[in-house]
Amino acid sequence: MKTDKLHGVIVPLITPVDDDDRVDEVAFRKMIRYVVNAGVHGVFTGGSAGEGPLLTIEEWVRMAEIARDETKGVVQLLGGAIDTSTKRVVERIKILKQIGYTNFVITPTFYTTLSCPEEYLRLFGACKEAVGELEMIAYNIPSATHSTIPIETLTEMARRGWIRYCKESSGDPDYFTPLFQQARHVGLQIFMGDEASIATGLLAGACGVVPVCANYEPETFVRAYAAGVKHNIEELQHLQRRVMYLRERLPLLAPCWIAGVKYGPATLGIGSGKPVSPLQPLTLAEKKIVNEMTQAKRSRAGG
């Protein structure tokens, strides 16, 4: 049976870790409560921001179990099944199903780049068989997988009934503009994952957004989604400017984009800000920029 309709702000959760790259359960639960209390519609674990493919399988399972327990059905819960081959991805799907997940986010396999439509269909077909009647969400993120899911492949999967949703994170208007146009004809709903394109995506009919900076400031994205639903262009453009400010000071602050995204919540008392090894943490100078942003944020909020 299909899950309830997915929509709104889905936060791609960071995964706080300790010095040994083990999941910091206390901080992770705090992270989930922080975004849920801000009114987001769902959370996505084990994705790019969650460093899912970087964790050991034991810690990845712990992460998935903690998120399932902490959300308790209050918001939509999506689990990333991201790996380097079909069998590895299917193994992760089976683990997530055992834990109780009903929404599965699948990227193209990586390291060896997919090269033709048949390979994409072979991968997603096996994943759909493993998912069964539960929800499979295709995730296009060429910056991480170094391959782009062909639009024709996405629409074909929608025609076959394999997917109803796609998370689009290419940031390329030459890709997502025709994707939006063609998706309408096959009932494919699109989540905008590129923060620079949130306003564009919502006005084009995106069913929601999946923004990494929502780990730091979820309320801005909740307001942006509401403005998009109401077609309040002035408000949406105002919030898009705030999104760009956050983007410059978190994912774009350092060569390792995840470092700023994880350090932002750390300035709010959530986790240490450490990325999974071998990724490079922020420098002291970079941390100062985020610290000053958080100080300004607290000043505006009255402390």
Image (cartoon, rainbow, N blue to C red):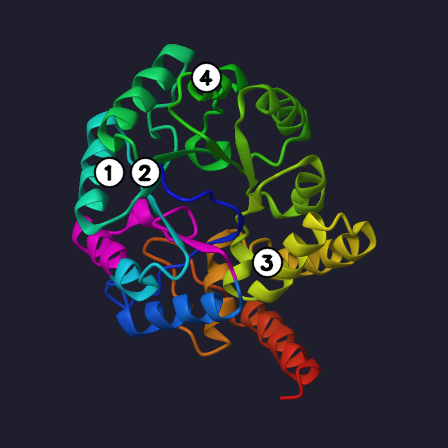
Tag nearer the camera, 1 or 4: 4
**What amino acid type is highlighted by mark number 2?**
Ile
On the image, the x and y values in percent for residue 280 come to: 42, 57
**What amino acid type is highlighted by mark number 3?**
Leu
The answer to which of 268 and 259 lies nearer the viewer is 268
- To which residue does mark 2 refer? 82
Tag nearer the camera, 2 or 4: 4
Residue placed furthest toward the bottom: 303
Dividing the picture into quadrants, the one containing residue 151 is top right
Q: Secondary structure at mark 3?
A: loop
Dividing the picture into quadrants, the one containing residue 175 is top right
Q: Secondary structure at mark 4?
A: helix
On the image, the x and y values in percent for residue 14 come to: 41, 59
**What amino acid type is highlighted by mark number 1?**
Ile
Tag nearer the camera, 4 or 3: 4
The image quadrant where one finds the N terminus is: top left
Packing grade of label 3 (10 A; few <14, some 14-19, many >=20) is many
Q: Is residue 236 above or below residue 176?
A: below
> Residue 159: which disc?
4
On the image, the x and y values in percent for residue 279 come to: 39, 54
- To which residue does mark 1 refer? 93
Q: Disc 1 and disc 4: Cα gap in Å? A: 22 Å
Tag nearer the camera, 2 or 3: 2
Which comes before the other along the chain, label 4 or label 3? 4
- To which residue does mark 3 refer? 253
